[in-house]
Amino acid sequence: MGCRVLSLGTAALCLAGVLMTKVALAQRRVHVDDIVISGRFLYEAADSTGLDEPVLHPFTGTLFDLWPNGALKSECVIEDGEWGFNCQEWHLNGQLRSEEVFDPPYVLWNGWYPDGEVFFQKRFAFEEPLGPFIGVGEELDAKCFTPDGALMPCPEEILWPGESE
């Protein structure tokens, strides 16, 4: 088994004799338990080819997690083993809980209560990742709201009402 590429206009990866283009890799969905996370880097194990330790490759695709009841909890786009800052989380009831969006030069993080009302809107400066850190910089501004929509001071740490992790 093997991959033989004579001419290819896009990036490709050969795993177990199957040629996979970057588009096909990006469409892959893998559960968080099947990924090795090391700092800000994410890897998937390939055949160890008889070695004691599996061979790790940077993961490209959609990483997801589920609530204990099987409902979707989170999804993040990962490219070449790094977080892409395009992540969504859902409450147990299926309502969108939070969303991170990379909007250069910012990372926007918005959150909602289980009933869909806005909980917070935050904007961070994006900084290139250093070492094991993901790369979100200083919080530039934030607005937080009570469940009835009134402005309130933002808590130091976001705690989701009525849900345990």
Image: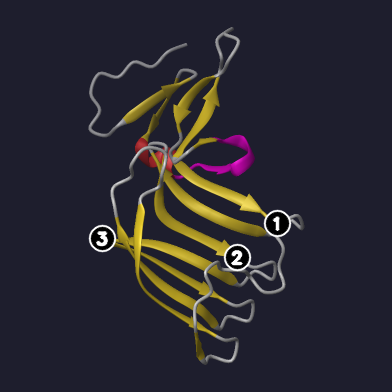
Task: Compute the Cα span from label 1 to label 3.
Answer: 31 Å
Q: Residue at x 42, y 13 (%)?
A: 2
Image coordinates for residue 155, horizontal then vertical, percent: 53, 74
Closer to us: 126 or 25? 126
Q: Is residue 47 above or below residue 143?
A: above
Ranked by sequence position, the earlier of labels 1 and 2 is 1
Q: Residue at x 50, y 42 (%)?
A: 28
Give the residue at mark 1.
Answer: 67
Q: Secondary structure at mark 1?
A: loop
State if disc 3 and disc 2 touch (CB < 8 Å): no
Give the residue at mark 2.
Answer: 90
Q: Quadrant of residue 158?
A: bottom right
- Residue count near mark 2 (Cα–Cα under 10 Å), binned few <14, some 14–19, many ≥20: many
Task: Give the colour scheme shown.
Answer: secondary structure
Task: Compute the Cα span from label 2 to label 3.
Answer: 24 Å
- Of tags 2 and 3, the one toward the viewer is 3
Which stretch appears magenta?
A: 27-36
Give the residue at mark 3.
Answer: 104
Ranked by sequence position, the earlier of labels 2 and 3 is 2
